[in-house]
Amino acid sequence: MNKSINNRAIFGGCLGFVAYFLPWVSVAFILGSSPSALVSNGSNVFSLEILAALALLVFGVLAPRLGKLANAIIVFASLLGVAFLLHIFFYEFFTAFSLAQGTNKWGGFALLGVGFWLAAIGFITSLVGGIKSLAE
């Protein structure tokens, strides 16, 4: 088994876990600052991000023992993380589009925070590693 593929899942899980506590959206938007603050406010969809990141960490470590099952779970958790990121991206896009006036309508959604981009890098890296490991 290729050890770097397991490292990709662990790396992606670490980035997703750290990104959960970092700002995801500019404070100018309604969504808030980080998913951890929103979970405490009752929005449970954000718990999917931390669960996907933790699954990547756990099954990235267990991949040498579990083999294809761990790799399939890594791909599933990565896809769940990417779907969550797309949900946040489009939510921000339509929020910015509905609140902004004139030429600002198309630029406001680009104010996503560092947490969003770190999670995106982590989940995409894990997805690529999981797909490569399933192809072997």
Image (cartoon, grey):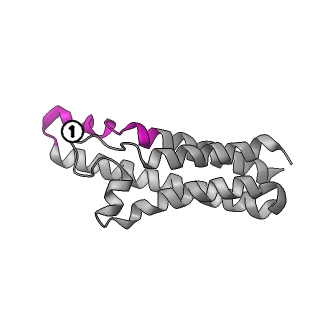
Q: Nearer the viewer, residue 53 or 98?
A: 53
Mark 1 surroundings within 10 Å by alpha-carbon count, few (fewer than 14), some (14 through 19), many (20 or more): some
For residue 132, side relative to residue 100 (left or right): right
Q: Name which quarter of the figure residue 42 lies in.
A: bottom left
x and y percentages locating residue 22 in the rendered image: 40, 43
x and y percentages locating residue 55 in the rendered image: 62, 59
Q: Is residue 106 magenta?
A: yes
Report the predominant secondary structure element of the magenta stretch.
Answer: helix
Q: Nearer the viewer, residue 100 or 124?
A: 124
Q: How many marks?
A: 1
Q: Is residue 66 above or below residue 121?
A: below
Residue 128 seen in the figure: no
Residue 63 seen in the figure: yes
Magenta stretch: give its range: 100-117
Residue drawn at x 19%, y 34% is: 104
Residue bearing mark 1: 105
For residue 116, side relative to residue 122 (left or right): left
Q: Is residue 10 magenta?
A: no
For residue 135, side relative to residue 81 (left or right): right
x and y percentages locating residue 99 in the rendered image: 16, 46
Q: Amino acid at mark 1?
A: Lys
